[in-house]
């Protein structure tokens, strides 16, 4: 058994992982989740003790999370095979990519829209006061 505090181990892993840059999109997310899975197994190894029941629970949780991860990876690989552009780009990059494709095809550029909704302007109309009066009749 290792005599390392799991909190220290996780903070060291987080510090090291923050220096590593993965790709974007689904594939980059998969790599990040893999690092989390490795961290989970390191914590499990550190927490192993002489208590067989607690060890079985820890290992069982690790196995379940690992199986879920590899099932997710299999689904994401299928997605990446079917939609490679979407799999490697994040949301804003994907929008810019489609905009560039449309411009290359000769379609006119869309006019720029607002970056965010104005909180002072109502998006939906205010409820009618007559509807509220009908609800009070009971």
Image: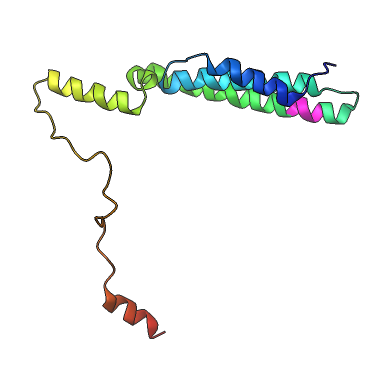
Residue located farthest toward the bottom when viewing the structure as drawn: 137
Residue drawn at the location 53% of the way across and 25% of the way down: 72
As for residue 52 lying within the magenta part, the answer is: no
Q: Is residue 117 left or right of residue 24?
A: left
Quick one: 96 or 118, which is closer to the camera? 118
Coloring applied to the structure: rainbow
Q: Is residue 62 left or right of residue 102?
A: right
Q: State the image coordinates of residue 29 (x, y, percent, origin top left).
A: 48, 22
What's the magenta bit mostly, secondary-structure-wise? helix
Residue drawn at the location 41% of the way across and 22% of the way down: 25
Quick one: 90 or 117, which is closer to the camera? 117
Q: Is residue 50 left or right of residue 65?
A: right
Q: Quadrant of the N terminus?
A: top right
The magenta segment: 56-60
Q: Is residue 84 left or right of residue 109?
A: right
| Image quadrant assignment for residue 9 | top right
Q: State the image coordinates of residue 96 (x, y, percent, origin top left).
A: 25, 24
Q: How many numbered badges does the structure rendering display? A: 0
Residue drawn at the location 31% of the way across and 23% of the way down: 93
Residue drawn at the location 24% of the way across and 62% of the way down: 125
Q: State the image coordinates of residue 78 (x, y, percent, origin top left).
A: 44, 20
Q: Quadrant of the C terminus?
A: bottom left
């Amino acid at each position: 058994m290792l005599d390392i505090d799991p909190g220290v181990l996780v903070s060291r892993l987080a510090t090291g992982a923050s220096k590593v840059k993965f790709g974007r999109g689904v594939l980059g997310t998969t790599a990040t989740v893999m690092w989390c899975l490795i961290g989970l197994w390191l914590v499990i190894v550190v927490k192993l003790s002489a208590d067989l029941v607690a060890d079985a629970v820890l290992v069982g949780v690790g196995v379940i999370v690992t199986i879920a991860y590899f099932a997710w990876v299999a689904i994401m690989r299928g997605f990446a095979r079917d939609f490679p552009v979407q799999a490697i780009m994040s949301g804003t990059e994907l929008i810019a990519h489609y905009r560039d494709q449309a411009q290359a095809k000769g379609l006119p550029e869309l006019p720029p829209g607002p970056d965010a909704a104005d909180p002072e302007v109502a998006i939906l109309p205010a409820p009618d006061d007559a509807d509220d009066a009908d609800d009070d009749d009971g």
